[in-house]
């Protein structure tokens, strides 16, 4: 049972992973098909992009975002390097998505699912999280979230420069707990037993030359350590019955740079099939969130009714 300080009964945490996010998109399709709506969600990098489709309840947009957009010619490689100054073509990818499956902003804002997007502030060297109300027509916040270190140019937003929060928060489990989630469901693009390797010396040297910021370089050096700490926390929450992890059972030779729809399609379908296999487990784990959220809605309605009654009474006294 959620404690008295919990704000959300269950939260959804979506890890990034470049084009490997197609697996998570398949998972989210099954969630939407079965009307499993989390009251809270948080994502970084490509995890924030697929979350948009989930929060706005646009099932068809999931395939466009995770498969079709990745296969267009300006997604990754030399073309975006010359056009956008980075190996990931975030502008071209966003343009493709919005022209083929535009985001329903009204549905996003009015959705029952709260959403937070993580970005790395280059001035403060801290990860900051912003709500869905900050997503604008230009998708600047989402593109900043997907701007991978060394592979894409940072984005200026609110007069500050931001890039992918995955430099520090690869899995935003701590943010979900800070937001008040009693339990969490984690969507990971990595198979069980995955271990992130330390950044090679050439990456550290390149980061030093490009960013000229010792904190960024140190964060890159400690990235694999922080990633393991985040998984250690998730493992602890699992042992306590407070976390459920959904992850691929195999890697299928898919990397964060895979762009071939013929490869990403089966990867997406793996997410669909493996989620269906665990559907009863997922429903059992999230069952309380519907009851808790209904109780919160009823309490909110009661407060509004009481407020209105008091307002009427006070008004009559003044007449």
Image (cartoon, rainbow, N blue to C red):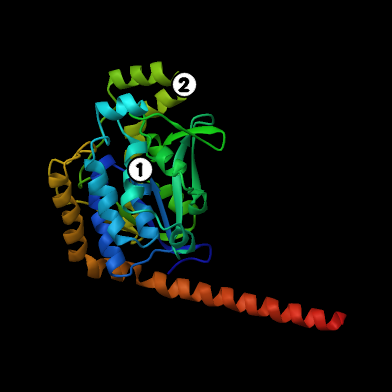
**Residue at x 43% of width, y 34% of height:** 163
Judge whether 187 appears above or below 74 on screen: below
Which of 65/48 is in front?
65
Q: Earlier in the sequence, mark 1 or mark 2?
A: 1
Q: Does residue 215 appear to the left or right of 67 in the view shown?
A: right
Q: Indicate the secondary structure of the residue bearing disc 2.
A: loop
Q: Position of residue 109 (x, y in %)?
A: 48, 59
- Helix, strand or loop at label 1? It is helix
Observer-nearest of 169 and 34: 34
Q: Position of residue 241 (x, y in %)?
A: 33, 62
In which image quadrant can residue 27 be found?
bottom left
Q: CA distance from mark 1 to mark 2?
A: 32 Å
Q: Residue furthest right?
A: 319
Image position, residue 237 (x, y; %)? 35, 55
At x 50%, y 47%, the residue is: 130
Residue, disc 1: 95
Q: Quadrant of the C terminus?
A: bottom right
Left or right: residue 201 compared with residue 304:
left
Residue at image mark 2 = 213
Of 56 and 94, the residue lying toward us: 94
Residue 93 versus residue 240 in the image, above or below: above
Q: Position of residue 1 (x, y in %)?
A: 42, 69
Would you identify the image quadrant in which residue 305 lies? bottom right
Name the residue located 19 percent from the left edge and 53 percent from the top edge.
268
> Can the viewer see residue 189?
no
Label of residue 122 in the image: none
- Up-down: is 183 above or below 141? below
Q: Is residue 180 visible?
A: yes
Left or right: 204 in relation to 309: left
**What residue lies at 25% left-to-right and 63% top-to-bottom?**
30
Q: Residues within 10 Å of mark 2 (few under 14, many from 20)?
A: some
């Amino acid at each position: 049972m959620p404690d008295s300080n919990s704000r959300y009964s269950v939260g959804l945490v979506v890890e990034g992973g470049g084009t490997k996010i197609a697996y998570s998109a398949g998972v989210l399709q099954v969630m939407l098909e079965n009307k499993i709506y989390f009251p809270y969600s948080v994502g970084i990098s490509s995890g924030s992009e697929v979350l948009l489709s989930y929060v706005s309840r646009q099932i068809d947009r999931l395939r466009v975002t995770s498969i079709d957009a990745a296969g267009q010619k300006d997604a990754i490689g030399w073309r975006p390097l010359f056009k956008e100054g980075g190996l990931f073509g975030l502008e071209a990818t966003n343009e493709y998505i919005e022209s083929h499956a535009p985001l329903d902003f009204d549905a996003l804002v009015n959705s029952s699912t709260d959403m937070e997007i993580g970005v790395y502030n280059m001035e403060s060297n801290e990860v900051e999280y912003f709500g869905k109300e900050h997503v604008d027509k230009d998708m600047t916040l989402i593109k900043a979230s997907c701007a991978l270190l060394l592979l894409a140019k940072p984005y200026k937003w609110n007069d500050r420069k931001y890039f992918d929060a995955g430099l520090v928060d690869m899995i935003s489990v701590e943010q979900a707990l800070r937001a008040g989630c009693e339990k969490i469901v984690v969507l990971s693009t990595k198979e069980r037993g995955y271990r992130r390797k330390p950044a090679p010396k050439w990456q550290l040297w390149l980061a030093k030359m490009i960013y000229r910021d010792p904190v960024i370089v140190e964060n890159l050096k400690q990235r694999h350590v922080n990633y393991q700490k985040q998984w250690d926390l998730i493992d602890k929450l699992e042992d306590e019955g407070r976390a459920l992890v959904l992850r691929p059972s195999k890697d299928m030779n898919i990397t964060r740079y895979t762009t071939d729809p013929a490869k990403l399609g089966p990867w997406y379908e793996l997410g669909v099939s493996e989620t269906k296999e665990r559907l009863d487990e997922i429903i059992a784990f999230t069952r309380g969130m519907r009851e808790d959220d209904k109780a919160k809605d009823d309490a909110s309605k009661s407060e509004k009714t009481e407020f209105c009654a008091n307002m009427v009474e006070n008004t009559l006294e003044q007449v």
